[in-house]
Image: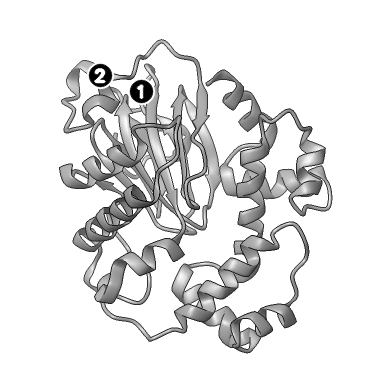
Amino acid sequence: MNANSILGNRTLVTSQASIAPTGGGDLERSCTSAVSDSIKVAPASGGIERIEAHFHGDAFEPHRHDTYALGLTLQGVQSFWYRGLVRYSQPGNVIVLHPDELHDGAAGTDEGLRYRMLYLPPEMLIGALGEKRRGLPFVPSPVIADRAFAASLGDAMRDLDGAIDTLQLDDVLTGIADALGRHADAAGMAPGRNYDQAAIRRTCDFLQAHFDRQVSSDELETVSGLDRFTLARQFRASLGTSPHRYLVMRRLERARGMIGSGKSLVDIALETGFSDQAHFTRHFKKANGMTPGRWANLRSRA
């Protein structure tokens, strides 16, 4: 299929037998195809989210994350629209989606798709990048064949029943930073302006601690030591999103963790700072490509 195929007609005509996996190791061998559509969510690990998903047909509607989305295709063909083109990832490939880039997701063949994904907050990456750059590396190609990168992600996502411990997290961040550096374009790895990263980190910490209430610009000025307009510019340039959207995404992150706990969606919406369930549902769908009700249903099948 031509890469410019329209979104509604993108099924790749191929068979699994024709695909030679380029990596994946134990993760790939652990997968079976006779599983209904589902999402398994790993325990929270220092701000990193990890999932394993199995889908047939279309999985996610167009949506955006404020994190890097880093994935491994395990079975089938992973099809997604990204930066104006339909892309395809085969088993063993690494997927790299930049923060705040619109994308969707689907199985590229009738036999379905299984993959694992790690969602990395940009502020966690900046420290691991060291002096390589002061902003965010941009990887032009979202589908990469890189065995070292795949191995690093595979280690981080191998055990979805347990959390990543602190020492392992340091290794994961270092491996990801090095891999993104290898594949980023020259402009993406050039040193940027020397933003006040300490102020941005304080702002992130404050927003994470107060995700369940309204936060004012006056408060962020006091916390960061920057005026609201300088903070807004530096925050977006450094992390790829605004303080307001960062706050909303932290609410959604907490809500995703609460789904499946037995609480109603109404209670989850109110406890995570949304005005009502409709408000929660609108933001959830924009950020995750599906409603919270469908997310809950898919989690229950995992």
Residue 269 is left or right of residue 297, and the answer is right
**Residue 138: quadrant of the picture:** bottom left
Amino acid on which the number 2 mark rests in the picture: Gln
Q: Which mark is residue 16?
A: 2
Give the spatial CA distance, label 1 vs label 2. Answer: 9 Å
Amino acid on which the number 1 mark rests in the picture: Thr
Whether label 1 touches label 2, CB < 8 Å: yes
Q: Earlier in the sequence, mark 1 or mark 2?
A: 2
Residue drawn at 25 percent across, 19 percent down? 16
In the rendered image, residue 42, in percent from the top left (x then y), is placed at: 49, 35
In the rendered image, residue 155, in percent from the top left (x then y), is placed at: 29, 39
In the rendered image, residue 12, in percent from the top left (x then y), is placed at: 32, 28
Up/down of 27 relative to 72, above or below: above
Q: Which mark is residue 109?
A: 1
Residue 297 is left or right of residue 22, and the answer is right
Residue 223 is left or right of residue 174, and the answer is right
